[in-house]
Amino acid sequence: MLSRSSSEATEAVLQTFYDKLEDFSVAPLWTVQEDVLVNEPKSKAVPHLWRWSELRPQAMRAAELVGTADAERRVLMMLNPGLDGRIATTNSLFSGLQIVMPGETARAHRHTPAALRFMIDSKGGYTTVDGDKVPMLPGDLILTPNWNWHDHGNDTDSPMIWLDGLDIPLVRMLESVFFEPYPEDVQPITQATDFSFLKYGAGSLTPAWQTSDSTHSPLMHYPWDKTWEALQGLAPATEGSPFDGVVLEYINPTNGGPAFPTMGCHVQLLRPGESTKAHRHTSSTIYHSVEGSGHTIVDGQKLSWEPKDVFCVPGWTYHEHINASATEPAVLFSFTDAPVLQSLSLLREQAHPDGHQS
């Protein structure tokens, strides 16, 4: 009968052997296996909240001190305190606050990390994505797929501030970052204004003469008025998700998939006084409070948010949302790395056994 073997080697003999292995650039797996093959994941990222009331003054100060000719992008990075200075908000997602002042442009470039912009504060302005001039109004979601030329311009008399979301940590981990500046500061506009919305913005209606096998959404602009209309129309007619309230996904209109192969985008409405149940999933999420106030309990920690605040929920961490108002709805925008995990058969979800956290 076969059985497990044992050894009488002393610790000193083993250590000598392990030291010798370093000469061959190898190491024993059995000494670290418990650190690698864990019972369940535990993210090094921690729950954290960034307050708009604190960040906006810093963005305005950055605009005074640093011009768009001095910085490729004037962005305040939201760095997770648990990730030891990594350029990351969660393990695989990055978020930042970008500001463009009146009369300024942020020059054209392209890169392999995909990017999204959720508008926080503006009276207008635009992003040009591969020749398509896309307007940027509060609440609008603008996509910049990887390797698409893009530049930003503020032709208004007020600052433009938006939330940037990128998959930079993931792409850097895969050692696949490429960057290229455009030959000129601004790329030419080659299409009708907001052309992707004209083409794909009708939702259930798309051009019959053209198909797309792109892995990212061909729709670059999801206007807030359409999003808000959808939320308001649906909220009275459904209970929604027990974990997220009335939650909608910004989809690729050609195939119903996520906005990007690496990032999915959602918006959710919490009715007055609504409290969701707690759950967790292997995907991590970055949230932005569009309107309303409340709090999210993440791994037992209470994060109280107000309009325009940003907070993150690391992967496999229990979380639940509470709308603190008895009379007004609360709306959260979020983006997540769920599409990556889904494509690798690594996306798992679990409800809290008690429904709520202590």
Image (tube, grey):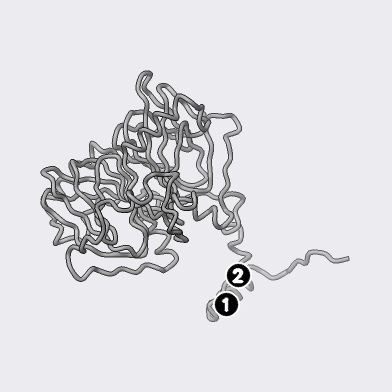
Q: Position of residue 318 (x, y in %)?
A: 51, 38
Say which of 77 and 289 sits in front: 289
Residue that appears at 25% across and 56% down: 128
In terms of sequence position, does the residue under pointer 1 or pointer 2 come before the other? 1
Q: Quadrant of residue 110?
A: bottom left
Residue that appears at 48% across and 34% down: 244
Looking at the image, is 181 positioned above or below residue 287? below
Q: Amino acid at mark 2?
A: Pro
Gap between marks 1 and 2, in whole Å?
A: 8 Å
Q: Residue furthest front?
A: 209
Q: Amino acid at mark 1?
A: Leu
Looking at the image, is 24 positioned above or below residue 284? below
Q: Quadrant of residue 168?
A: bottom left
Q: Residue furthest right?
A: 1
Sort mark 2 into few (<14), some (14-19) or many (20+) by Cα contacts within 10 Å.
Answer: few
- Does residue 46 show up? no
Identify residue for label 1. 21
Identify residue for label 2. 28
Residue that appears at 53% across and 37% down: 279
The N terminus: image quadrant: bottom right
Q: Residue furthest bottom?
A: 23
Q: Position of residue 281 (x, y in %)?
A: 53, 44
Q: Position of residue 226 (x, y in %)?
A: 35, 38
- Does residue 250 show up? yes
Q: Are marks 1 and 2 in contact (CB under 8 Å)?
A: yes
Say which of 170 and 157 sits in front: 157
Residue that appears at 64% across and 73% down: 13
